[in-house]
Every structure is written in structure tokens, then in C-alpha cells.
Amino acid sequence: MKPVTKMTVVNKPLRKIDSSALSQGKKLYTGDLAPEHSLYVKMLWSPHAHANIKKIDISKAEKMPGVKLVLYHENVPRIPHCTAGQGYPEPSPYDTFMFDKKVRFVGDRVAAVVAETPDQAEEAIKAIEVEYEILKPVFTYDEALADNAPIIHDEPEAFVPIPIPYEPKKNIVAKVGMKAGDFEKGMKEADFTFDELYETPYAQHCPIEGYISWAQIDPYGRIFITTSTQVPFHTRRIVARTLGIPVQKIRVIKPRIGGGFGCKQEMLLEDIVAIAAYRLNKPVLWALTRDEVFRSGRTRHPMRLRIRYGLKKDGTITAIGLDIINNTGAYGGHGLTVMSCAGSKVLPLYHVNNIHFNAISIYTNLPVGGAYRGFGATQAYFPVETMIDVMADKIGMDPMEFRKKNHIRSGEGHPAFEALGEGKPGTPMTIGSCALAECIDKGAKEIDWSKRLPHTEKTSRFRRGIGMSIHMQGSSVPEIDMGSASIKMNDDGSFNLLVGATDLGTGSDTVLAQIAAEELGTTLDKFIVYSSDTDMTPFDVGAYASSTTYLSGEAVRKTAEKVRQQILKVGQEILQKQGFSKKIEELDLHDAHVISLDGSCKVAFGDIANYSLYENNQFQIGAIESHITHKSPPPFTAHFVELEVDIETGHVKVLKYVAAVDCGTAINPQLCEGQTEGGLLNGISYALTEEYRFDEEGKMTNANFMTYNIFSMRDKPEIKTILVPSYEETGPFGAKSVSEVCINGGMPAIANAIYNATGARLKKAPFTQERVWRAIQEVKK
Amino acid sequence: MTTRKISFTLNGEHKEFDVLPNERLLSLLRRNGFKGTKYGCLEGACGTCTVILDGKAVNSCLVFAFQVNGRSVQTVESLGIGEKLHEIQEALVSEGAVQCGYCTPGIVLSAKAMFDENPTPTVDEIKVQIDGNLCRCTGYEKILVAIDKVSKSHNQGGK
Amino acid sequence: MRVKDFIFASKISEVASLMREIGDSAFLMAGGTSTYFIASKTSKVAIDITKLPLKGISRVNDNYKIGALTTINELQKFKDEGWVLDRVARIIANQQIRNISTIGGNLARVFYWSDMPVALLALGGSLKFSGIASRHVKIAEVFSKPHSHKDVFTASILDYIEIPAATKGMGFSYQKETRTYGAFSSATAAAFIKIEEGVISEARVAIGSVLPFPVRLTDVEDFLVGKRPECKLLGEIHFDKLAKMKLMPREFMTDEFCIHLIKIKAKDAICEAMKEAMGGCK
């Protein structure tokens, strides 16, 4: 394979292929494409955290103007399913029904109205009479696990489709754990031991486009669903199950998506629009309001994490213990996998022989946890990377040097890779490419780490601090996730690239086309990319687990490689006719031509396509290929932050944030930077401002952008992204993932910088002014 | 509730529309095919529905449709016709500031209104004037660079 | 809030008669941004007043006259020696809202997090009303109690606001604490200080956001007047009046922290205003 420096399309900051049209506001998103006379859905959401529905009277609502259909638990199929978009069979409970006679959180479905206008639907919702039997709710970790706790899932149907422990009667969704070495012994060998509790909040992804789906019935009676989803193929399968109809009946189309970040790795609206469209034989549209996105959409799981460490004076870590209680809320879709990743993407980062990891996912009567960029690792990195600083401080070692001494390196493995899978053992692997050491050096230089002073030397009201953290993630779920692609050549030497992979705004359509163009020796503009249409494109699991570039990208490269062979052969045949007798090995694809390596002859792609389509030995140049991965190579990153703390008000102002990233070969460096910058800013506001607040009834009290505060351009610190190249042998052109790893730094790096500024340790996020101020008061004592 | 007629200048053309008194400008625009104005939060906090009203960027989800009677409204459909992008769009695209793209039309219009008033804003002025357009994909870095690039091009005797 | 009908008014006299005619369901609308926050069970008839000639900022001697329909953006962009409201305006909400929201609307519809009343209470000045009862009312009087505010705004139409120009020997500071720039204020304080012959001759200190309605801390003002503007003054301020006030229950903050935070912000405002009045830090 040619070196990255010789590549002409890969590793180039080429324009995202859809960005011009998007900047012009073209009709490209789900809501823009809905038929003009679509009917509208509005949902009656549960006002109670935990209640049985004793009676529903829909008779008044049904007679309201414009109302076409009212759906509730008595008039729809009752089929248990899991809304989480994962490979089948999922390691997750089938604990959800389209509608149930029980509601399990404020914002759970009660009944849906389909009407001619949203206002009519809204009015009809108010006319539905429901009698509830209020049950005692479960809100806290301790309440969920208490003896005689109310049982949230007492329905007999709930089950997990693979043989793993599921104990709904104890409100336990799943347990994950691993041991290596001897944890107790490791703690005994230590000169210092640590035992601390950390807590992370509920958070929402806040894509600017909320959840939206519509469905219509095609002339042959099939259901076409157009939806803002990260998982079109899983959605097709889950809708089919939920409605009790064959997969064949359904087509799912994903147009442009206005952001997802994990929250759209879920079948959330599609079953309702599908069944409504089917029953009414009319197009039906459902869009959630921002308020509904917060309350009834998916969230980042809140976790309580106990962390224990054993440490020797020389900086050797003798033991790590991580015990997690994970709140999945009312339904358990991602309950197991998010804990697995909290272990497998975090524990291997440092050399420790004695490991104890134990995680438990519980149900509560609160909003539902889902997939969220970083997926469990983000939560676990908060205690792990904060404690690294605490330990370094204890032995008087620079925290950067401490990290350098202990972090994982190329060629090394870790027992967590093998132990922690998705409902089954994981996949053993050794680290291939790893430029973490270089990331640390480059980031440190950019933030000017050498100027960092201890907090004891700071006395003014506004105190500056510098902090850092390092992270890894993964690239795809090995041995489980599959991606595929097909390519065909057109008359003029252009290509159709069809992928199941799901571009949710990341630019993966562009990245995948760059990979194909590189392999085929042509340019990006020669590709017509079409993605994520279950009727038209080959299968792909979808956009999650940092898989698209590494997994789907390799599927594309393999497909292109096949096509490449076909083009070479046809080219050889044409050249032969022109009197140039060349072996295949003497030919190459370059600049949209088949060329001879000696430069003596060439033939253009357009001529090759025309020859194969019209002239001789006709056939369609084209191929389909699939790929599964055998490892999940981690991208690495080092994050550095400089901030200023007002010790009187607890206000934290982030001044500068540096992320040095090893994502292997950056297929499109500009898009890799974009992923990094977007992720890290989300990480910063997750650390400082984002959090769900609930009233005593379990109702979220800040379900809007005015009180759930995400950062604006004005809040943004100076951001510096440094891409540090490495070459991952198993990835397409050396690529690994980039999207998730960058969100992990905000919480620990900022906590460490606050400590460096003030001597205050934050263990509960977000770091609100009051929490920071109180922690500073503790230091003063 | 009955509809009433209003008229205003939309992208330079005089237009008449039937509106419901409670209808917001966003809804009026979208149901008349102007889908470049996106729906984000309906609370004036995300800016994805930004349009230019009498030269100023406003949230079309907060403005009642009747409020624009007799006034002038500009939407993204008026900028960058065909393959020729407006200089703001061009800068956003070339700097990689368009990820999911959902917030982009709103940002284009906020920036347009800003440049119409002041062709050479400083970085600080840009941050203040584009503070109403939330983006969750980019971390704003490339958006800021792109808009600053346009400002600098004006400074160098561009437009 | 829902709107059931709308009317465009072009003269102030017209507005007054329309309000009488329509009665309780009449709703004056300029920018209209507050309608998002107003929970009303009944639909309203909107009287669009944006075409009334109540716009613009002009300086008349040592005062600024600000038309009620002047937008926050216009306050933000206006530049003049002695003009200080740009500091307030540039950190209100977001640019789209500043572009349409008016100073009149900001004063007429006061929410606990409102910024402008706090700033104007500290600046001093007056409001000129017309309509049923045409009169000049001191800002302090209008905002003395929620019900007096309500009385004056339901009975009349705000024409313009008059505030002093901050000339030599005067200082103004506005301090707003927020989670993000776009967030509601967690605590807002503003201070106006006038120094004559080396002592504080005039002081106004106002706070908001931690309370249901903005107030002036008259005890703090009394303490400051007659003193020399020195840093150590700040340490001697007692917030006796504040201690007795009923706080607005706030998310993310306990009462204890709320009180602490507003005291710090008030001291910051006083400190900055003193510095400015002295022509820089001494």
C-alpha cells in the first residue's frame, strides 16, 4: 500500500460533499421532506413517575375536530421489544411496549392522537381522560436497590433474548464485571490507598434537530418511514417486531440528519408513525418539541462511581477498583453495554495488574438512558482521570510524568478487552497504533505545561489553573458489527457508492467516498453517494460505537478493491486491442485512468465504462463487499485545559482547551478536527453547566435551552486541535475512529485544572458555581 | 380562529399570505415551502430558525406572523442561488464549519445581518452577534474562523 | 400566550382608545419576545405598536432620552461618552432577541431574571408615560413594589425613558452572573456612584434575579454616601435589608449561596462604579 503522504484523496481536507446544499437550506432533512398534507401526531405523556393506568376514556378525543385516530394500550399490539438500536439479538431487556397499561416515568407514553393539524391533536390530547393508580416511585440508586423496593418492571413479558442475568424484580437490568490479578493483594502492596465516590448527572445530546419521523404507505401497501435516525436497519427490524409485521413490509429512509450524538440510536417515534400511517393509509408526521426531546428522548446515564486505587511511592499503580451503579431510568436498552464500555474503554489505559471492576445497571422512574457519545467511558473517565492527578499529587510527581510512566503502549494488551463484551466475553487484542506519548508532548507544549504552578502559590481572587487528562475509546464492536457497501461504475467514469452506513452530520458519506476514490485512483467528485436506505443500500449496523470510518470504511475499501480489479482487467483488454500488451501487475489506477507503470499507455475510466457497458464482453463493473472487525483499535487523545476560577463566586471560565488526537490516518483532517472540537466543547459544558433537575415528583424542571444550558459561540474558549498521525494496520488506509474519544476530557481535565487553581477537588458534576465555591470553602478550613 | 391577510416583502418580492393570528413566522414560512428556515426549539434559544427582518436577525419562532406585515423578510433561499454560494456560505463550507448543517442557514443569516451593518467586525464582535445560534456539532471553532475570514476579506478591500 | 386577533396602531392616542375598547384581553406588543414566558389562560388581542414614533436615543443636556420602542440592540450599539447601557444590553439574552426586544417591553414585563430594571434602578432617572394618565414617574417609584409597577403600566403607555449621562465624577457598574451567556441571570447587581470633593455624594445600588422583583438596597446606599471611596469600604458594608428579604427559589443554588453570590456581585458593582467615578483605580 502506498504511504499516506503519497495519497491524493485520503488525508486531504476536502469539502464535505453535502455542505454546499446544506448551507443553502435545501430541503434535505426529515421535516423538509414530509408530504404537504401529512397528519400530525401528538402524544399524551405520563404526568406521573410510576402509575398504573386504571382507565382511559378516548371517546371525547375521538370526536374532536380533525382527529383521525387515537392510539393507546388497548388498541395496539402488545409486543415486548427493546428500543435501543443494537445488533440482534440484543444483550438488553425487551421491556417496552408500544403502549402499556403502566407508566414508568414522567414523559412515558400514554396515548397518541393523530389529527389534521398539530393544534387539533393537541386539543384532543387534553380531552383524553385517564384514571391513574399512583404507585410509589423509585428515584435514587438506594431506593432502587432497597429490599422491598417498588418493582418498576413487574410485567411478565419482559425478557432478555440472550442468556444473561436479568432481575427486574430487584430493579436490576444487568451486571457486568471482571477481575484480573488479585485486587486485595494489590491494595495491600500499596504505600498509599485511595477510596472515593464520584457522581455524574443526567445529560441530553441536544441535537439542534430533535426527534422527527414520518411514514406513508406506498401503492403496494408497504410502509415507508423517513426518519432522523442513526440506525435505519435496526429501526426497520424493531418496528417490524413492534407492529408484528415482516421486515419486508418496511422501508426505512434516512435523509440528512440534524445531529444525533447517540440519542437517535433508538427506535423512538417510528412505530407510532408507521402504525398510524398503516391504519389511516395517509402520511403521518411526528416531531417532538424541545421540551419533549428532554423529557421523553434519550439521555446520558447518570452514574455513581466508587474508585479505589493502590499506589507505590515510585508511581507504580498496584490496584484499581471501580464499582459503578448505573441508572438506566425506566427502560433498560443500553443498560448493559454502557457499563461494559465504562470498563473496556477506560481500564486498559494504565498499567495495573490487579483489577476489580463491578458494574450494575438499575431501573428508576426517571428518564431513559441511551447511547451518548463516549458511551459510559465518559462517565468512568471522570473518577479515573481525576484520581490519576490525586495520586500524582500524593507522591509529589508531575501528573503528566505520572501518566507518561503508566499509560498503555503499542503492542500491549489488557484483560478488559477479553473480559468485557456485549452480553458475552469481549475480544482479546493488543494495541496496534498508539501515538499517545506524542499527543501528550504536543499538547503540553501548546498549553505551556511548564509554566504550571502549584495551587499553593496562588493567592488572588481570580486564580488560573492548568489541568490535563488522557483518554482512549474504541473503533467498532469487534466480531459483532457489520458494515457493507456497493459500488458501480457509470458511463462517464463516475461511480455510485451505496452504503448502509449512516451519516448523521459527521461527514461519513464524504469520508467513505474519499476512501473509495483513493482505492480507485480517481477524485471525490466522481462519486454519487447514497446512504442508509433499507431498500436500496446494503446493510450496516449504523452510526454508533465509533465504527463508521473504521468498519464501514474498510467495507468500502474492500468493495473498491474488487471494482479496481475489474477496471484493471477491462483496461488491460482495451490496451491489448490498442497494441499494448501489459500484465495486470504492470498497470495501476491513477487520475481516473488505467495507466501502465512504465508510462507508455493509458486508458480513461470513461472509455473503460463505455467499453464494459456497450462494446465487448459487456458487464456491469461493480461489487458489493462486507466487513466485520476483529479488534476495536482505540484512538488516543491528550486534553489540556487552562481556566480561571473566581474563588468568591465559584465561576469557572475556561480560557484555552487543547486536544491532541491520534485517530490513525485522518481520512479527512478537517472533519477529524470538527469531530474533536464539537465533542470537546460538549464535554466542557457537560462538566460545567449541563444537568437534568427534577422536582419531587420526578418531573424534569429545566427542559428547555434557557435553563438546560449548552455552550454558545460566546462561551467557547480558545480551542486548539492537534492531529497526531499514526497508522492502524487494520483500518482503511491506517484510520481509526475519532468521534467519541474527544468528549471524555472535559470533566476530568477541568476538575484537575480547578484543583491546580484552588486546591479544591470536585467529585460531583457538573461543577456549578455553588459546588465549586463550596469545595473552595472546604480547602480554606 | 379565522385567518387574516397580511402582506410583506419576502426575499425582495411583495407577497400576500393568509395567517392565523397565533401563527408564528416560522410556521408561515415553512408551510409555504421556505424550508431553509429550520425548526429547533420554538423558544428563541437556538437560532436555527433565524431570518432577517428589516435588516436584523430575528428568531422566526418568536415573531408572530402578523408582526411582519408591511415589513421586509429575508430567508436563506435568497442567498447563494444555484451553485454559486454567498461568500458567507462559501467560507463556512470551505472551512469545514458545516457538519450536520441544521444550524447553518441560521448562522448564515445572522452573519449576513451583521456584515450588512458592519463589514469588518472583530472576533469579539462576531462572538457577541452570533451568540444566538447554537451548534452542537462543531464546537463553533470553524464557524468563528470562517466568519472571521469573511470579515478579514472585507478589510482587505474585498467588498 | 395565544393571540386570537391583531390590530396595528399608528398613533399613541389610538392605542389608548383601543385598550379601553378591548379591555382585559388587550396586549401591547412591540418585539413580542415576552409572549413566550407569559402564561395566560385566555387568548389575547395583540395591539402591534411597533409603528408608533417612540424610537431612538438622544442626548438632552446631561440626560439620555430613550424611546420606549428602542431595541436592546440599539442600546448595545449606541456609542457616546457617558452612555453606559451598552454594557447592560450586550449581555442580555442573545442577538436575535436583542434585535427585536425593546427597552419598553423589558420594563413593562418584569420577570425575576430581568436585567434592565436592575440597571435602571441603579442609574436613576424617570419614565414618561402617556395615555390615560400622562406623567413623569421616577424609576424608583415605578419599581418600588410589584403592584405599583403593575398599576402604572396597565393604566398608561410608556413614551420614553430618561437616564443620566455618566459624566465626570460618576461611575456605573453592572454585574451579572450567569451559567452561560445565554442563560438567565443567577444574580444581577448594579451600582451608580457619584463622587464630589473626594466623598461619595450619591449612591444607588440595585439587585435582582435572586429576588422575585428587583430592589434597591437603600441601607447600603445610605452607608456609602458621605464616605471616602476606598476599597476597605466594601468590607464594612452590611446587607441588613437583604438579609430580611424573601429570596426567589432558584435552581442550582441554595439560599445560602444565593445571598453570598449577590453580596459579592453588589460589592463588585460598587467597587467598579467607585473606580470609574474616580477616573480609574486608585
Image (spheres, rainbow, N blue to C red):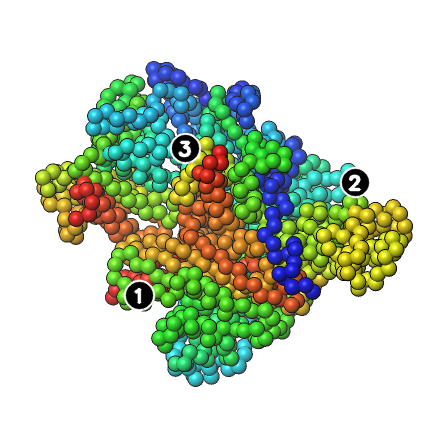
From the viewer's perspective, is residue A129 above or below residue A372? above
Residue at 57% from the left image edge and 50% from the top image edge: A260
Position of residue A484 measured from the top left corner of the image (x, y, whole percent): 72, 57
Which residue does the numbered mark 1 point to in the structure image? A455
Q: Mark 3 and mark 1: span between their CA atoms?
A: 43 Å
The three-letter code of the residue at mark 2 reads Tyr
> What is the chain letter for disc 2?
A
Instruction: Check if mark 3's residue and mark 1's residue have beta carbons within 8 Å.
Output: no
Which residue does the numbered mark 3 point to in the structure image? C99
Q: Mark 3 and mark 2: span between their CA atoms?
A: 51 Å
Position of residue C53 measured from the top left corner of the image (x, y, whole percent): 35, 20
The three-letter code of the residue at mark 1 reads His
* Left or right position of A696 against A3: left
Position of residue C194 measured from the top left corner of the image (x, y, whole percent): 16, 38
| Closer-to-camera residue (A69/A541) | A541
- Label 2: few (<14), some (14–19) or many (≥20) C-alpha neighbours in 10 Å: few
> What is the chain letter for disc 3?
C
Which residue does the numbered mark 2 point to in the structure image? A220
* Left or right position of A401 against A609: left
The three-letter code of the residue at mark 3 reads Asn
Q: Mark 2 and mark 1: span between their CA atoms?
A: 71 Å
